[in-house]
Image: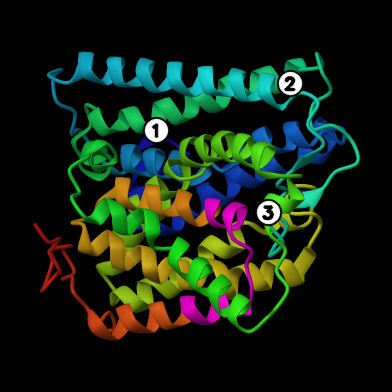
Amino acid sequence: MNNDHAKTIFQRRPLTMFVVLSYGISWLIWAPVTYLSDGDWYTVRWLTAIGSMGPALAAIIVLRLRSKSDCTSDPRQSGRRILFLAVFAFAGAYGIWDALAATGEVWESKAAWPRPLIQSDQPLISPGSLSAINSIAILLNALLVAFVVSRAKSPSLRIRARFESLIRWRLGPWMAVAVLLFLIPLAVGCLVSIASSRELEWPIFAAGGLTPWLHYLARISLFIFLFGGANEEAGWRGFALPELQTRHSPLVASLILGVIWGLWHTPLHFGPAYGGSGWSGLAMQTMLGTVPASILLTWLFNRTKSSLLAVWVAHGSMNLGPKIFPFGGAAAIVLLLMVLTVVFYDRMYHRRFSSDGNAEGMPKADK
């Protein structure tokens, strides 16, 4: 297949090629995780994070091959390099600090759905045993997240147009909305459970007390926001959602993307990352997780004028929530009510884009 033929396929079927590449890149990296980790959960976490870069890398590849010649000369070259180096230095320094801080710990979040915390009989990392694979995984994650974020200043007009909102900080009150969007149903659900005298499994007690929990929370928060948001959102909301909304209403686009997003996690449910939860865990995550989350993230994305930073923060907050609050049936009901509210209040069942991608009655962010 020559280069021109490849570009033709990416130009005619960009969304299909994006899904194929997202699954292919992620699944190819996730497949050997069990073998490479050798039972070391810390290695599992970092290798899983590398695989989660699939959607962002797929979006960059499709956008690059889809465009014929849309590169500017050079006005943002130095800014791109500075942004890359800054993100790489921060992410790399965090990874090294996290590894040193984690030595000897005997518990960790394994993201088994829906339990947020699972006790471990062995240390997360034994003191002084940071392996070569861990070091490589940490540096590779730092390189990849720096590469993705620096596309906000890409010389490619098409890529820059999709990614520049990653560094658009002026969101006003919408930043608070992004932070609280997925924490609210968990907090309200806890209050309902407490009021009805139901027993809850609080992460703070699984951690062994307030001090170790706060220590862990500080570290895992940085990990989640650095390596658990931009890597996915640059693809799901940065590329796939705008493509889907040119053909469907925001609601239908969200439902389609929610299923694609959920099934993308399939290998994780059959390996150590999600505790071997299997098909039942995958079905529960898709129905109670990615589909309703996709609707809320679409609403936030459209309301903030397509801000990837907003959905990046919200995605991180969603992943962080179970480390703070226990998840239960009451939280799921509150989440469903929030989804119904935004769907009907914003009339997300109406199509808002024309076939050429121009907005038709698109809701705008408040000033």
Q: How far is disc 2 from disc 1 in space, using C-alphas?
A: 22 Å
Secondary structure of the magenta portion, mostly? helix
Looking at the image, is mark 3 or mark 2 nearer the viewer?
3
Of 327 and 270, nearer the camera is 327
Question: Magenta stretch containing residue 60, yes or no?
Answer: no
* Residue located 34% across and 39% down the image: 65
Q: Which residues are magenta?
A: 320-335
Q: How many marks?
A: 3
The answer to whether residue 326 is left or right of residue 315 is right
* First along the sequence among labels 3 and 2: 2
Q: Secondary structure at mark 3?
A: helix
Residue 133 tag number? 2
Q: Is residue 29 visible?
A: no
Q: Nearer the viewer, mark 1 or mark 3?
A: 3
Q: Nearer the viewer, residue 200 or 230?
A: 200
The kind of secondary structure element at disc 2 is helix
**Mark 2: amino acid:** Ile
Left or right of residue 124, residue 203 in this image: left
Q: Quadrant of residue 158?
A: top left
Residue at position x 37%, y 15% from top? 85
Q: Quadrant of residue 297?
A: bottom left
Q: Nearer the viewer, residue 112 or 215?
A: 215
Residue receiving disc 3? 203
Say what amino acid the circle numbered 1 marks. Val
Measured as percent of width and height from the top left, residue 261 is found at: 52, 61
Label 3 CA crowd tier, 10 Å (few <14, some 14–19, many 20+): many
Which numbered disc flags the more N-terminal residue, 1 or 3? 1
Disc on res. 148: 1
Q: In the image, what residue occupies the spot 18% across and 69% down? A: 355
- On the image, the x and y values in percent for residue 2 come to 43, 35
